[in-house]
Amino acid sequence: MKKTRKPSARNLIGPKVRQVRLRTDPPVSQEDLAGRLAVAGVAIDRSAISRIENQERYLMDYEIAALAKSLRVSVGELFGE
C-alpha cells in the first residue's frame, strides 16, 4: 500500500496573503491580485496565487515584495510581524 503524506509548507506567508486579500474593502479576488502583479511586472497568475495561499508554491523575494505592494501592506506584515 502506498503511503501518502501531506507535503511540507513551501512558504510562510500564504495564509496571511489570503487573509490580507480578503480583509480589504472591497475584497480583492485572486484574479484582481494577479492583474495588480502583472501591472507591477511580476507574472503570477490566478492559479499560482491559489498555490501560494495553500503553501504549495515557493516564492522569490521580489515576488513577496510585489505581493506586499499590491496588497498595500508591508513585507513584515505578510510574515506576521
Image (cartoon, rainbow, N blue to C red):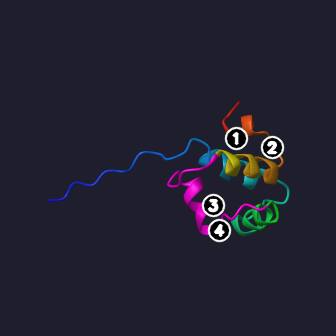
Does residue 59 show up magenta in the picture?
yes
Residue at 62 percent of width and 44 percent of height: 13
Residue at 22 percent of width and 54 percent of height: 3
Answer few, some or many: residues within 10 Å of disc 3's Cα (few below 14, many 20 plus, some between 14 and 19).
Answer: many
Answer few, some or many: residues within 10 Å of disc 4's Cα (few below 14, many 20 plus, some between 14 and 19).
Answer: some
Tell me which segment is drawn in magenta: 41-60
Question: Spatial distance from mark 1 to mark 3, Cα to Cα?
Answer: 14 Å
Q: Give the amino acid type for the residue marked by disc 2 in the picture.
A: Val
Q: Which residue is mark 1?
A: 78
Q: Give the amino acid type for the residue marked by disc 4 in the picture.
A: Arg
Residue at 65 percent of width and 68 percent of height: 46
Sequence-wise first label, 2 or 3: 3
Question: Spatial distance from mark 2 to mark 3, Cα to Cα?
Answer: 17 Å
Q: Give the amino acid type for the residue marked by disc 1 in the picture.
A: Leu
Q: Give the amino acid type for the residue marked by disc 3 in the picture.
A: Ile
Sequence-wise first label, 1 or 3: 3
Question: Spatial distance from mark 4 to mark 3, Cα to Cα?
Answer: 5 Å
Residue 71 appears at what percent x and percent y? 79, 51
Mark 1 secondary-structure assignment: helix
Badge 4 vs badge 3, beta-carbon distance below 8 Å: yes
Mark 3 secondary-structure assignment: helix
- Magenta stretch, main secondary structure, is loop
Q: Which residue is mark 4?
A: 46
Q: Which residue is mark 2?
A: 73
Residue 50 appears at what percent x and percent y? 59, 61
Badge 2 vs badge 1, beta-carbon distance below 8 Å: yes
Query: Relative to 71, is 28 above or below?
Result: below
Query: Relative to 32, is 13 above or below?
Result: above
Q: Which residue is mark 3?
A: 49
The quadrant in which the C terminus is found is top right
